[in-house]
Amino acid sequence: MRTQVVIVGGGPSGLLLSQILNLRGIESVLLERQSEAHVLGRIRAGVLEQGLVDMLRAADVGERMDKEGIVHHGFDISCNGERHHINLSELTDGKSVMIYGQTEVTHDLYDARCKMNGNVINEAKNVALFDLETDHPSVIYEKDGKSHKIECDFVAGCDGFHGVSRGSIPTNILREYEKVYPFGWLGILSETPPVSDELIYNQHDHGFALCSMRNANLSRYYIQCSLEDKVEDWSDERFWEELKTRLPEDAAKSLVTGPSIEKSIAPLRSFVSEPMSYGRLFLAGDAAHIVPPTGAKGLNLAASDIHYLSSALIEFYSNGNERSLKIYSETALKRVWKAMRFSWSMTMMLHKFPENEGFGDRMQRTELEYLFSSKAAQTSLAENYVGLPY
Ligand code: FAS
Ligand code: PHB
């Protein structure tokens, strides 16, 4: 088989790239290791930057998001029970964020791919990449016990942190930067009304907590937990009690609890691999970088990568110009590192660090006091949260 672009990975990065290329008449084959049901069963991000919202609308995938998504113009930060509002729209000349789950985005992308007869191959096993440093790379995969080879012009590595693409870049070329945080996030989904109209990020002596949502009757909550914790250590009752402890009093009082319909623990890390391209291979999304979810940037960074990569591929196939492809890595990494900085700073400001006694604690408290007292500090946080320009 031959195609123009092989896309490895059918999460939001790969599906969005496949949809954008298809709309511009560029052929692609997407290889996803898991079943469609497995991919659609993942519960992940919830906050979309304007850039991603615009991309989904331009890719004919924004209809349900515009019907069911909730536009948010701000959020609260509470510090040991004292609540402060960050008015995103006031601080960023009217910008906002959209609350719409990544699960729904992925659903809408799969539906759009199906409507356009996009070439998406699920349960494609043992994907391997070859001849990336030539102008005729190829990809091999197995499906239903048979091996298949695809000749192509380019490979897009959209296969997440545990994928095969990043590892296909020679170790003497790849540089990795990583910070692993000494805690995780225990997240639950419950069919209960959200505790507040907007998100609440809570800094507390017991640890961080986040109140988010998916719609008027589907709430998403997280609490910082130990890396030694297991999901089975946390009954729903224990979770709700600990969450209430970390919330400001008014929120704790009005919190509606109920059975969890999903419960999971995610470790937190900051990770960047450079370069994001090697020959005819281009990495995008979690295949190249991971942010702690405190800044709600993971999914949104995947979107800006796909913006740069799809534009560069469209330029190449329209007029043969490879310039944007050659500077893709440098261009994408400029925005990646800024989102990495923001996500790291939000994580350092809001979480309890066991080793942070004394000076570290005072720095954290001063950081928050400065934020609450300075419009300049709030403007800086707000412009990063709504999304820096592409
Ligand atoms: P994904 O990891 O979403 O997709 C990669 C795809 O490639 C997967 O479907 C995988 O099955 C497939 N794949 C892997 N190896 C393959 C192979 N060898 N061959 C073929 N296919 C292969 N971000 C936020 O902004 N807020 C959050 O709250 C948040 N919570 C998260 C919780 C968890 C547990 C995780 C893991 C991530 C979370 N993220 C969050 C980040 C997340 O949203 C990612 O940024 C987003 O999924 C990135 O999308 P992709 O780059 O498409 O990677
Ligand atoms: C979510 O709703 O899952 C969510 C929202 C904001 C974050 C992280 C996760 O910073």
Image (cartoon, rainbow, N blue to C red):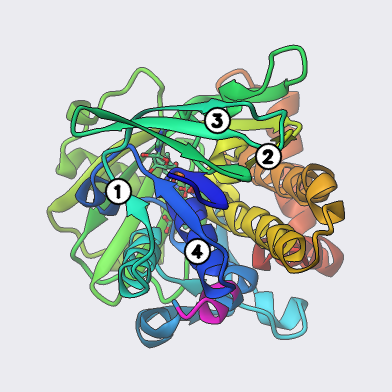
From the image, state whether disc 4 or disc 2 is nearer to you: 4
Vertical order, 211 against 375 (above or below): above
Q: Is mark 1 within 8 Å of ligand 1?
A: yes
From the image, state whether disc 2 or disc 3 is nearer to you: 3
- Residue hosting label 4: 47
- Residue hosting label 2: 344
Left or right, 280 with respect to 299, comes to right
Q: Is mark 4 within 8 Å of ligand 2?
A: yes
Left or right, 79 with respect to 315, comes to left
Which comes before the other along the chain, label 4 or label 2? Answer: 4
Please, what secondary structure does the residue beneath circle 4 have? strand
Which comes before the other along the chain, label 1 or label 4? Answer: 1
- Answer yes or no: do the residues labelled 2 and 1 have beta carbons within 8 Å? no
Dot label at residue 165:
3
Q: Is residue 34 visible?
A: yes
Residue depicted at x 71% and y 24%: 177
Q: Is residue 115 magenta?
A: no
Callout 2 amino acid: Trp
- Residue hosting label 1: 39
Task: Bin the neighbour count of mark 1 within 10 Å (Cα to Cα): few under 14, some 14-19, many 20 and up.
Answer: some
Q: Position of residue 196 (x, y in %)?
A: 39, 72
Q: Is mark 3 within 8 Å of ligand 1?
A: yes
Which comes before the other along the chain, label 1 or label 3? Answer: 1
Residue lying farthest to the top in this orientation: 172
Please state the extent of the stretch shown in magenta in the rendering.
55-60
Please, what secondary structure does the residue beneath circle 3 have? loop
Task: Bin the neighbour count of mark 3 within 10 Å (Cα to Cα): few under 14, some 14-19, many 20 and up.
Answer: many
From the image, state whether disc 3 or disc 4 is nearer to you: 3
Q: CA distance from mark 3 to mark 4?
A: 27 Å
